[in-house]
Amino acid sequence: MSKPLSSHIALVTGASRGIGFATAIALARAGAHVVALARTVGGLEELDDEIKKAGSTATLVPLDLKDLDGIARLGAALNERFGKLDIMVANAGLLGPLSPLSHVQPKAWDELIAVNVTANWQLIRCMEPLLQKSDAGRAVLLTSGAASSGTAYWGPYAASKAALDAMGRAWAAENATNNLKINLFNPGTVRTRMRATAFPGEDPATLTKPAAIAEKIVALCLPDVKETGQLYSFPAGKFLKFNEPS
């Protein structure tokens, strides 16, 4: 089996379940050492077992992404241990309240923005120097079609993903002259706990499995990727213009 990511170090956030869990395993199967970040220790331990079965290794990082100092400490630890970071998959996110904007409570808003926006900014700030040390640094930021849909009651989540889109595009432009390639990824409708929370009456058998999403995310992490600052839509099966329906 080909191991195109041998000797690569890959950070995955939200790695204890869903898309993050599946992506971490897919990266491990491709040969990467996975730095798996999540709040749930049990989920990380289960992931570690699966990565060992895949013939690779992992570093488990139990961390709440609202802990900005913790993210900074992780960056310093990765620099000391590995001296670089080849891949960052920013997958972790909250759904937040599905509610009219005027009914959203400040605490819920603040938590959503802290995880979906501020934590990703801190990851960018702390991991960029390590990604720039890689011969082929790759970053994939998980977004959503909700960012541009203007759907009622999805305002908080949509706003957070629109902010992430803007950050990702700006970050890519800032690294246009080096080896770091940064892209956004819209997975569409996936069989995850977040999706079940948003659409409790939906038949999960009709949804894409996380493993299929993970394979495409890994493809965007390979050294031969040339695109940067782009939005890949899994439902469309292609890169889209940012004003193009996904």
Image: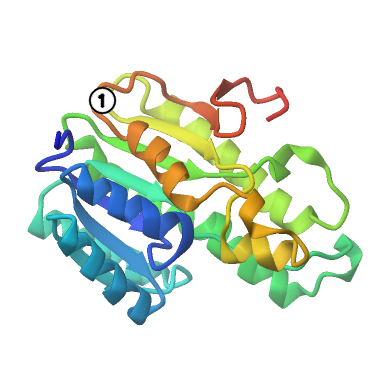
Which residue sits furthest bottom?
42
Question: What colouring does the structure picture have?
Answer: rainbow
Towards the viewer: 97 or 18:
18
Assign a secondary structure to mark 1: loop
Q: Residue at x 62, y 55 (%)?
A: 205
The quarter in which the N terminus is drawn is: top left
Question: In the rendered view, would you say 185 is above or below 231?
Answer: below
Query: Residue most toward the front?
Result: 205
Q: In the shown orientation, is residue 224 left or right of residue 236?
A: left
Closer to us: 68 or 108: 108
Q: Quadrant of residue 153 in the image?
A: bottom right
Quadrant the C terminus occupies: top right
Crowding at dot 1, Cα within 10 Å, few <14 / some 14-19 / many 20+, comes out as some
Find disc 1 in the rendering and name its residue: 179
Horizontal side of 159 relative to 37 (left or right) equals right
Image point (45%, 32%), residue name: 183
The answer to whether 30 is drawn above or below residue 170 in the figure is below
All told, the count of numbered labels is: 1
Place of residue 185 in the rendered image (x, y in percent of width and height, measured from the top left): 51, 38
x and y percent of residue 139 in the render?
36, 39
Give the residue at x 38% y 55%. Answer: 22
In x, y percent, where is residue 164?
57, 45
Residue 222 occupies which quadrant of the picture?
top left
Residue at 22% of width from left, 55% of height from top?
Answer: 34
Q: Amino acid at mark 1?
A: Asn
Can residue 222 be seen by looking at this rendering? yes
Q: Can residue 77 be spotted in the picture? A: no
Eyeballing the image, is 233 above or below 104?
above
